[in-house]
C-alpha cells in the first residue's frame, strides 16, 4: 500500500483535531467547573446527576409545602390556644356564679363578661391567615356577598358558611329533653306503683315513694320547658319553612298546656307530701311521748298518750293516702306531658320531636353541616403524604348543644334571666367538656407541627445527601482538569511542531 503525503496530512490533522477537542473539553470543564457538560461526556453519570436533580427539585417543593403547612398550623394553634383561654375564663365565672352566694347585680356583671367572651369566640372563629380564613374549610375568602364565615343574625342564630348551627343545638335540646322525660317517667311510674300498693299503715314508705314521684315529675316539667323553648327557637328561625314553624308552634303550645297542668299537680302533690311529713313527724313525737308515759308508770298519762299517738297515726295515714292520691294525678299529668296524645292535635315532647324528624329544612341543614365537617384544607408534605392544615368550624366550635358559642350564649341568657344556682351549675360541666375538646384539638395540632419539624429535618438531610450525589456525578476536580489541560496543551503544541517538520510541501507536491 502506497502512503501518500495526503494520507499523512489527513491522519495528522485528524489526530491534531482530537487533541484540540480534548483541550477544548478540559478548558470547558475548567471554566464551568462541571465534569459533565453534555450527555455524551458520561451517560452513566449524567443519569445519576439527573436523578439527583429530580430528587432535589421534589424535596424543594415539599420543603415549601412544609413551611406553608407549618405557618397555617401555627396560626391554628394560636387561635385554639386563645379559645382555650376563653373557655377557662368562662369556666371560672360559671363556678363563681353557681355558688348561690351572689346577688342579682353580681350575676348581671358576670353576664356581661360572658357576653364579651361569647363575642370573642366569634372573632376567633373568623381568624384569617393572610387573606384566608382558617376555620371555614374551603371557604377561605368568605361568602360572595362579603359576609364572614361565622355570623349571627338578628334572631341570635349562629350561621357557619350560611348554615344555621343554632337549630341543630335546639334539636339536640329537644332530643335530650325527650330522653330525660322518658327516664324520669319510668322512675315516676315505678315510684307511683309503690305508693299505690303500699298500705297506709306504712305511711313513711308512701311518703318516700310520692317524694320520688314529685322529684321525677319536676324533671319532666323541666324537660318540657326545654322542649318548648327549643321548639320556639326553631320556629322563629329565618330558614325554617312556614309549615314546620306552624307545626312546632302548635306542638309547643299544646306541650305548654300539659306542662302547666303538670306543674299544678306537682304543687298539689308537693303540698300533700309536706303535710304527710308533718303528720309523720307528729306521729313520731306522739310515740316518744307514749314511751315517756310508759316509763313513768302513770296509767292515766299512758292512756292519754296512747290516744294521742293513735290519733297521730290515723292522721299520718290519712295524709299518706292524700299524698298517694296526688301521686296518681301527677302520674297522669306527667304521662300526658311526656307521651303523644292521640287527639288529633300536636301535643307533647314526642310530637315536637316528630315535627323535627319530618322537617326537610332541618335535615338539609344537618346534611350540609356534615359535608362542611369534611371540608378541610390539605397540603401535600411528602410523597403520598398529605396533612390537614385547617380545622372545620364544626370541629372548632362543636356541633349541637356542644357548640361553644351557643353554650356561652345560653349561659348569658341564664345569668340575665336570674337562673338559680342549680341551673347555672350545669354550665360548669358543659364548659369542662368544651375545654376537653379544645385541649384535644390543641394536642392534635401540636402533634402535626411536631411531625412537620421531623419532616423538615429529614428533608434537610436528604438535600445534603442528594447534593453530594449530584456533585459527585457532575462536578469537576479542578486540579485534575488543569493538569490534564496542561498536558493536552503540551501535547497539542508538540504535535504542531512535529507536524511542521514531518509535512513539508514542495512545488512538486502541488504539481502532482
Image: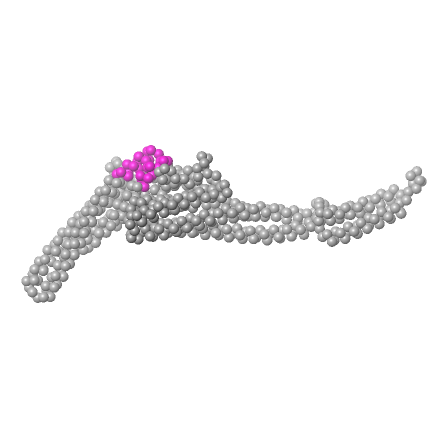
Quadrant where the C terminus sits is top right
Q: Would residue 449 appear left or right of 273 to someone viewing this image?
A: right
Which residue occupies the foreground of this view, 150 or 204?
A: 150
The answer, for residue 432, to whether it is visible in the render is yes
Instruction: Please check the rendered image and state whether residue 150 is part of the magenta-colored stretch, yes or no.
Output: no
Which residue appears at 92% of the width and 40% of the height?
A: 509
- Whether 239 is among the magenta residues is yes
Q: Position of residue 13 (x, y in %)?
A: 83, 44
Identify which residue is drawn at 30% across, 41% down. Answer: 229
Residue depicted at x 42% and y 41%: 150
Q: Does residue 53 appear to the left or right of 504 in the view shown?
A: left
Residue 296 placement, left or right of 249? left
Q: Seen in the image, is 423 located left or right of residue 11?
A: left
* Residue at the farthest right position: 508
Q: How many marks?
A: 0
Its colouring scheme is one colour
Secondary structure mostly seen in magenta is helix
> How far across and down, in percent of the image, does residue 188 sit?
24, 49
**Percent position (x, y) of residue 305?**
9, 60
Q: Of all residues shown, which one is farthest toward the top? A: 242
* Quadrant occupied by the N terminus: top right
Q: Residue at x 39, y 46 (%)?
A: 117
Determine whether 122 is above or below 275 in the image. Answer: above
Q: Give residue 422's position: percent from left, percent from top.
A: 29, 50
Q: Identify the magenta region.
A: 230-254
Note whether residue 353 is visible: no
Amino acid at each position: 500500500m502506497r502512503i501518500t503525503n495526503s494520507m499523512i496530512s489527513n491522519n495528522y490533522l485528524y489526530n491534531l483535531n482530537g487533541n484540540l477537542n480534548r483541550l477544548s473539553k478540559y478548558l470547558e470543564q475548567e471554566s464551568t467547573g462541571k465534569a459533565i457538560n453534555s450527555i455524551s461526556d458520561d451517560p452513566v453519570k449524567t443519569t445519576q446527576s439527573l436523578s439527583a436533580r429530580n430528587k432535589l427539585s421534589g424535596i424543594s417543593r415539599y420543603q415549601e409545602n412544609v413551611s406553608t403547612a407549618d405557618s397555617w398550623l401555627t396560626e391554628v394553634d394560636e387561635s385554639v390556644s386563645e379559645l382555650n383561654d376563653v373557655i377557662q375564663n368562662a369556666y371560672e365565672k360559671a363556678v363563681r356564679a353557681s355558688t348561690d352566694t351572689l346577688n342579682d347585680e353580681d350575676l348581671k356583671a358576670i353576664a356581661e363578661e360572658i357576653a364579651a367572651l361569647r363575642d370573642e369566640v366569634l372573632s376567633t372563629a373568623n381568624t384569617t391567615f393572610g387573606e384566608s380564613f382558617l376555620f371555614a374549610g374551603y371557604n377561605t375568602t368568605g361568602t360572595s356577598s362579603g359576609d364572614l364565615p361565622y355570623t349571627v343574625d338578628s334572631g341570635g342564630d349562629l350561621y357557619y358558611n350560611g348554615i344555621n348551627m343554632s337549630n341543630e343545638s335546639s334539636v339536640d335540646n329537644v332530643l335530650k329533653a325527650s330522653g330525660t322525660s322518658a327516664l324520669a317517667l319510668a322512675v315516676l311510674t315505678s315510684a307511683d306503683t309503690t305508693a299505690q300498693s303500699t298500705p297506709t299503715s306504712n305511711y313513711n314508705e308512701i311518703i318516700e315513694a310520692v317524694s320520688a314521684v314529685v322529684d321525677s315529675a319536676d324533671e319532666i316539667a323541666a324537660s318540657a320547658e326545654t322542649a318548648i323553648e327549643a321548639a320556639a327557637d326553631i320556629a322563629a328561625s329565618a330558614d325554617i319553612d312556614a309549615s314546620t314553624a306552624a307545626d312546632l308552634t302548635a306542638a309547643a303550645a299544646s306541650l305548654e298546656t300539659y306542662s302547666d297542668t303538670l306543674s299544678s299537680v306537682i304543687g298539689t302533690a308537693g303540698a300533700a307530701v309536706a303535710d304527710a311529713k308533718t303528720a309523720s313527724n307528729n306521729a313520731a313525737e306522739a310515740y316518744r311521748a307514749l314511751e315517756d308515759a310508759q316509763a313513768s308508770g302513770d296509767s292515766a298519762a299512758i292512756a292519754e298518750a296512747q290516744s294521742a299517738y293513735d290519733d297521730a297515726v290515723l292522721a299520718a295515714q290519712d295524709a299518706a293516702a292524700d299524698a298517694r292520691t296526688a301521686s296518681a294525678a301527677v302520674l297522669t299529668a306527667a304521662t300526658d306531658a311526656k307521651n303523644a296524645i292521640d287527639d288529633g292535635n300536636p301535643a307533647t315532647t314526642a310530637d315536637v320531636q316528630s315535627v323535627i324528624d319530618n322537617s326537610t329544612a332541618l335535615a338539609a341543614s344537618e346534611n350540609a353541616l356534615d359535608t362542611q365537617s369534611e371540608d378541610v384544607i390539605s397540603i401535600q408534605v411528602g410523597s403520598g403524604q398529605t396533612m390537614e392544615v385547617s380545622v372545620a368550624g364544626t370541629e372548632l366550635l362543636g356541633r349541637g348543644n356542644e357548640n361553644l358559642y351557643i353554650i356561652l350564649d345560653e349561659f348569658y341568657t341564664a345569668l340575665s334571666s336570674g337562673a338559680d344556682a342549680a341551673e347555672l351549675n350545669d354550665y360548669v360541666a358543659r364548659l369542662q367538656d368544651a375545654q376537653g375538646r379544645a385541649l384535644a384539638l390543641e394536642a392534635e395540632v401540636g402533634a402535626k407541627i411536631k411531625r412537620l419539624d421531623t419532616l423538615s429535618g429529614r428533608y434537610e438531610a436528604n438535600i445534603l445527601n442528594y447534593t453530594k450525589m449530584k456533585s459527585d456525578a457532575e462536578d469537576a476536580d479542578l486540579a485534575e482538569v488543569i493538569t490534564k489541560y496542561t498536558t493536552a496543551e503540551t501535547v497539542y503544541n508538540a504535535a504542531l511542531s512535529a507536524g511542521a517538520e514531518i509535512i513539508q510541501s514542495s512545488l512538486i507536491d502541488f504539481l502532482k
